[in-house]
Amino acid sequence: MEYQDIAIGLDVGTTKIVAMVGRRNEYNKIEILGIGRSKSIGVHIGVVNNITQTIEAIREAVSEAEHSSGFKIKEVIVGIAGQHIRSLQHNDYITRLDFENVINQQDIQKLIDQVHKLVMLPGEEIIHVLPQEYKVDSQAEIGEPIGMYGSRLEANFHVVVGQISSIRNIGRCVKAAGLNLAGMTLEPLASAEAVLSTEEREAGVALVDIGGGTTDLAIFKDNIIRHTAVIPFGGNVITENIKTNCLIIERQAELLKIKFGSAWPGENKETEIVCIPGLRGRDPKEISLKRLSQIIHTRVCKILEQVNLEIKNYGNEEQKKRLIAGLVMTGGGSQLKHIRPLTEYITGMDVRIGYSNEYISGGENGLISNPEYATSIGLVIKGLDDKKKYLCTKDIIHKHEENHTSEVISTKFYKKNKSSYDDDSLKKKTNKKKSKSFLEIWADKFRQILNDTE
């Protein structure tokens, strides 16, 4: 198997760093060849705050992925999130001078490049420029303008922006770990690739990825990205609340959340108690499961209320923007017990938990399709798609160069042999030489008059 047939996704999260190696099989499914995972220590709320620890964690995850896949990992596509991410809507256009030719990919790329030159706030740079609807001359709401005639190409764009320092810190960690950075993509967009169907994107859907440090949101309608947001709360704040309220250490709080936690406090009784071993030389602690679920419920409600606010800001209450497919939850936080009915109650939307089963082939004990790996799988899909686009573009350019060379050769041959077969042009030139201008005719008449006078 050639290296260009595979892609490696690197999910640099707040709680874990995952390196995943994958390829497409003959059925167009994603086959996971290897996976490596390490604990993320140097990342907080999706942002690198300790370069050295992050580099070591990346190396550990990549080394494990290399061992399990048998491939030497050279380059990766990295997911990016964090509270520094924001998005905006922008409209731009270009005027085509060669409007007699149809619109092609170069025209669209020129328009996208123009948007990339927008002046952002100090310390910010553009991560993604995502076209929505196009407009050609006076014709609006065009999904694909390639092949159409027009002199003015206009489009609405969804622009994702982030802090330069945060973006470069991630890039520095990747390069310091001995890897090339093939690209960066917003994590909710990557997760969407792994868990959303084409029908859901068409009908309108909100993807909510509850990670360790952030909750990422991506809204699709008519198969177009409409809104993105990164909420600076995730599973870590739930763990922190349990730790603070129950006076236990973080590891114990995380285990409590995973094994006994519930987002719906009405299920547990006051008499249900779990015993936590005390620290060295101290008595064990007894914690009420009802109290535990109340702590979790309070924090989860705040996260979901922020999600609901972002969905309202998008305009879900308008009939035209209604999200018919509801909401899809993924990420490690989506596995919390009873979070689905609570989300339905707060948002008033249909909710399902997003798994990657539809897009991947097989799996190690079903663990790969787990929602916590949705971003990693999405990054692999994105990496494979980017390689495919690159190869297609390269092929088109190659064919264009061949055609251009043929045209040049034909033109040279035509010029060289023009006199042998271009009779019409010779006749025209001969006629032009034989025909007289108005001044020449008038001069001849004037001479004739003079001669007659003599």
Image (cartoon, rainbow, N blue to C red):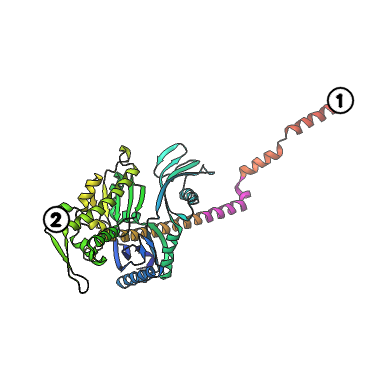
Looking at this view, name the residue that lies furthest to the top.
453
Q: Is residue 7 visible?
A: no
- Which numbered disc covers residue 80? none
Looking at this view, name the residue that lies furthest to the left.
271
Is the stretch drawn in magenta largely helix, strand or loop?
Answer: helix
Magenta segment includes 406: yes
Q: Identify residue type, mark 1.
A: Thr
From the image, tell me which residue sits under label 2.
Answer: 268
Q: Identify residue type, mark 2.
A: Asn
Measuring 18% from the left and 57% from the top, which residue is drawn there?
A: 291
From the image, tell me which residue sits under label 1.
Answer: 453
Q: Tell me the element at label 1.
A: helix
Q: Earlier in the sequence, mark 1 or mark 2?
A: 2
Magenta segment includes 137: no
Measuring 25% from the left and 51% from the top, which residue is drawn there?
A: 301
- Point out the stretch of residues depicted in magenta: 404-422
Q: Nearer the viewer, residue 12 or 149?
A: 12
Q: Nearer the viewer, residue 208 or 183?
A: 208
Looking at the image, residue 208 lies above or below residue 35:
above
Measuring 50% from the left and 41% from the top, which residue is drawn there?
A: 151
Q: Nearer the viewer, residue 70 or 334?
A: 334
Looking at the image, residue 114 lies above or below residue 44:
above
Q: Tell me residue 317's x, y (percent).
A: 30, 39
Looking at the image, residue 42 lies above or below residue 118:
below
- Quarter of the rendering containing residue 384: bottom left
In the rendered view of the protein, which quadrant contains the N terminus? bottom left
In the rendered view of the protein, which quadrant contains the C terminus? top right
